[in-house]
Image: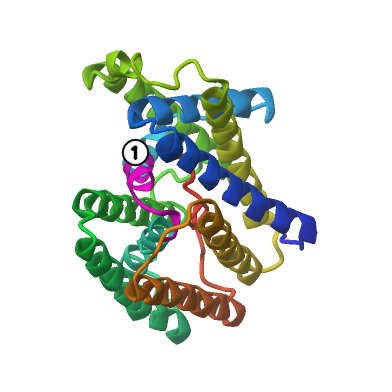
Amino acid sequence: MRRDVVISEYVTYSVLYTSTIICNKYVLTSLGFQFPTIFQAWQTFIGLFLMHAVGGFKVKQMVLRDIGPWVPAMMLYVGTIVSGSIALSKLPIPMFILGQGCGDVILLLFNEHMPSTIAMFSFPVKLAAAIIASWSAIQQSWYTALLWLIAHAIFSGAYRSVSLWYSTPHWPYSNLTIQQRQYLNYFFSTCVLLPLIFAFGHYEKAKSFPHLNASRFYIGSICSGIFGWAVNKLWMRLFFHAASDAKTHATQLFSKVLILLISMNIYPYTFSWSIWIGILLNLIADVLQILDSNFDQDLPTGEEMHDVLVSF
């Protein structure tokens, strides 16, 4: 039974979401830590540790036959956080947020429970925003960054689609809770990324990182890991206990607006008019999805990580 949560929890989520993005951006761009395998292995390890230390998570509660069907999602999760880490390091935050929201287009394409007319209007709007953003990125010669942003949107949308399918009764052995799924995401990502640190030579290259002995680097990395775990944990609570989906979607929209406003002051950047149009269209599409949530509460959501993949 869903019940409403207090307003402070919605506000806390928005603050944590904003803080996580800012911390990640600081470490990846301001300090220039360009080793995504190390950064993501660290963050997913922190998530594992905190799930045990704070949440009292029990591994024995999971069985192998339930884990197997979730493997595709775990693989997509790794692709999402790594591509997101690289895209965020190379792009301004507003551009990254715009690309991140384009994962909705993929989710709508593969959603077997077709949304209402209002939500379907958000599809062409988000698609138009993505096209405008891509054109703007090409105009500014962000070719490599654009490819990583597209990869992030594809991985994110595919992950959320699998999450949606997993939550339906048609998926075999879909008995894992949302906490168990996130634990598996952390565990699988850590196990995959640790050997890649050495395979890609990031371990040796990181030894020459200029801020390796700077306290601000470790403070930023620790805060990034903790905030990433906290925002996912709080989202799980909002997802289960909010009185309506419209409130959680509205909270996500408010979080986007908040990070856009704050980032433009911390990391000022002169955008072209086309990027602003893309950002506006993306926000309008989010408003349409909120209106849809108000009118239709019967469709299965299953989007437990809607735009909350902030472990990058």
Along the line of sight, the residue nearer the viewer: 236 or 283: 283
Tell me, yes or no, if residue 177 can be seen here. no
Read off the residue under disc 1. Answer: 82
Q: Give amino acid for label 1.
A: Val
- Quarter containing the C terminus: top left
Q: Residue at x 48, y 78 (%)?
A: 284
In this orientation, which residue lies closer to the viewer: 34 or 250? 34
Q: Is residue 243 visible?
A: yes
Residue 50: where, in percent of width, then height? 62, 27
**Relative height, residue 218 to residue 117 (above, below):** above
For the N terminus, the image quarter is bottom right
Picture coordinates of residue 185 (x, y %)? 44, 35
User: Residue 10: which quarter of the image?
Assistant: bottom right
Q: Residues within 10 Å of mark 1 (few under 14, many from 20)?
A: many
Looking at the image, which is closer to me, 170 or 180? 180
Q: Is residue 240 magenta?
A: no
Where residue 68 appears, as percent x and y from the top left, is 36, 35
Q: Helix, strand, or loop for circle 1?
A: helix
The kind of secondary structure the magenta stretch mainly shows is: helix
Residue 238, by quadrant, is bottom right
Would residue 6 appear left or right of 168 to someone viewing this image?
right
Image point 58% across, 50% down: which residue?
Answer: 17
Q: How many marks?
A: 1
Which residues, given as a range, are shown in magenta?
A: 81-94
